[in-house]
Image: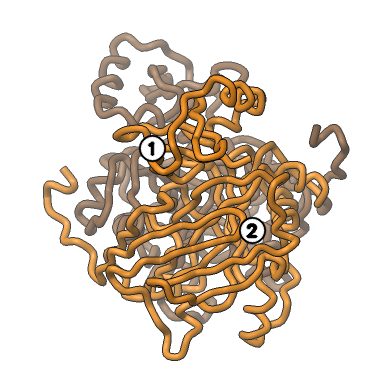
Chain colours: A orange, B brown
Amino acid sequence: MHLGTIRTGVGATRAAVREDDDWLLLDAADVGALIAESGWRERVAAARSAGERVPSAAAELAAPILRPAKIVCCGLNYHDHIVETGREIPEYPTLFAKFADTLTDPTADIVIAGSDRVDWEAELAVVIGSRLRYGDRAAAEEAILGYTVANDVSCRDWQSRTLQWFQGKAWDRTTPLGPVVVTADAVSPRDGLDIRCDIDGQTVQRSSTSELVFDAADLVAYVSQFTELGPGDIILTGTPGGVGLGASPPRWLRDGETLTTTIAGIGSLSNTMRLSAHAPQQTREDTA
Amino acid sequence: MHLGTIRTGVGATRAAVREDDDWLLLDAADVGALIAESGWRERVAAARSAGERVPSAAAELAAPILRPAKIVCCGLNYHDHIVETGREIPEYPTLFAKFADTLTDPTADIVIAGSDRVDWEAELAVVIGSRLRYGDRAAAEEAILGYTVANDVSCRDWQSRTLQWFQGKAWDRTTPLGPVVVTADAVSPRDGLDIRCDIDGQTVQRSSTSELVFDAADLVAYVSQFTELGPGDIILTGTPGGVGLGASPPRWLRDGETLTTTIAGIGSLSNTMRLSAHAPQQTREDTA
């Protein structure tokens, strides 16, 4: 099943399920609101016979989950990337958090004012479907609704100012998410999905999700040891080799470039960068 | 003005304003919901003449903000602590995030199952009152509603597993917050408020909020460069010297000990630790 969130007007969105070349609109504001209710699979089944249809070519997709309560991100998690950097395979996942405001739409421009080292990180994102605390791998697998695509766009100048990465990773509307959530019965990242990042058509990252050190179930089980996960929460699983920071010399995103992030069997994000190194001058009106 | 959130029944809470020995109940579920509406100061004034009263001795206080959208925490931020550890005064604040679920009530037991190195961190917490993006110090000061007390209880074993502190800092219901929000017109941390942490009556941390390297306005302005802050968001400002990790040998919290966290002019948290080194065994019923 492919679930998405469709923009239906200014500030208005609807959850939807894909059927052939159409989206069938559901009675929920986004996929997060949809799956928060226990009977959601029956509602999806009902929409298949009677739902309002939007041709997919006409649909503007939003981030499928608009306001997740928790976004947990993993760093240093691809075998090939770790080996190429000469590091050892880690015993524990390296985790940090983002806010809901950090997310943006799958085709939105990414506007950053105040950084001159903006980098890309193509990532598989896990969408949680049910409550989980103290889960083992089997319970974690049951709690996973499905998968989508993210790009953990990072401001490396801010990220490297201190030991903690957060301030380079939590810029408002800089992590595109989507375009769809593919449910776990329809796609298997463990078996290896091609993951790729392109800048203006040039491939900069390419790997397989089978290279993950801690796979989706590992990460969900681990995080659930310290915090309860629930429907709509998101786990970002880390990025393969090929980021701009690792190039020599380092290579940063430039204003006007388009970042394309693709995972085979799920879909593609396409985001144009709108970058300036300096923050806007604050005026009195801004704070009034 | 002293604002608080009172538990009025099972799962029910009300915002309230303090007047002499009473709390006057307000028409909002917590201080966060109260201040999210622009006319809240008028509603508080109206309650002073006609509001329902609860004697303060009978009031059970909750965390004043129950569901902040953003909690940003600063580490390594007290001059005395940095000097005693031989570090240099940092150029930028070290930041990480917590979730709303990490918060707990000012007198709640703190239950942690799965860590054997639980440590304390007494902290001044800043409560945001209005929207701010790209703020300078002056704008940041205007955006600060007031101050409260927190203890950034940390699982050092998990915190030190990787480079990122988050997994030791985001355990559900481990950061007590409160008991009240004192508005910025009534208290001035810059001028120096005594901050103290006691375990079973023995003082382990004692400093002054005038020792902050980055004060409240600095932190609020800095964070607003990458994310918009809004009413009810919380900034934790870091902890002074005297944590268990810094003792030799290190000294961890023990099951049954009571942690008291006090900032003069604001109030005290009192939390009894309920600790076990191992996570509960998950049963099939837990995931059903």
Where disc 1 sits, the SS reads: strand
What crowding class fits label 2: few (fewer than 14 Cα within 10 Å), some (14-19), or many (20 or more)?
many
| Residue lying at 41% horizontally and 43% vertically, measured from the top left | A57
Where residue A67 sits: x, y (%)? 47, 40
Where residue B22 sits: x, y (%)? 42, 19
Where residue A7 sits: x, y (%)? 38, 37
Q: Amino acid at mark 2?
A: Gln
Q: Quadrant of the C terminus of chain A?
A: top left
Q: Nearer the viewer, residue A131 or A39?
A: A39
Above or below — where is B69 with respect to B96? above
Above or below — where is A157 with respect to B180? below
Q: Amino acid at mark 1?
A: Arg
Label 1 resides on the chain identified as A
What crowding class fits label 1: few (fewer than 14 Cα within 10 Å), some (14-19), or many (20 or more)?
some
Q: Which residue is mark 1?
A: A7
Above or below — where is A33 with respect to A155? above
Residue A271 - label: none
Q: Residue furthest toward the left? A: A284
Q: Residue furthest toward the bottom? A: A248
Q: Which residue is mark 2?
A: B167
Where disc 2 sits, the SS reads: helix
| Residue lying at 26% horizontally and 29% vertically, measured from the top left | B38
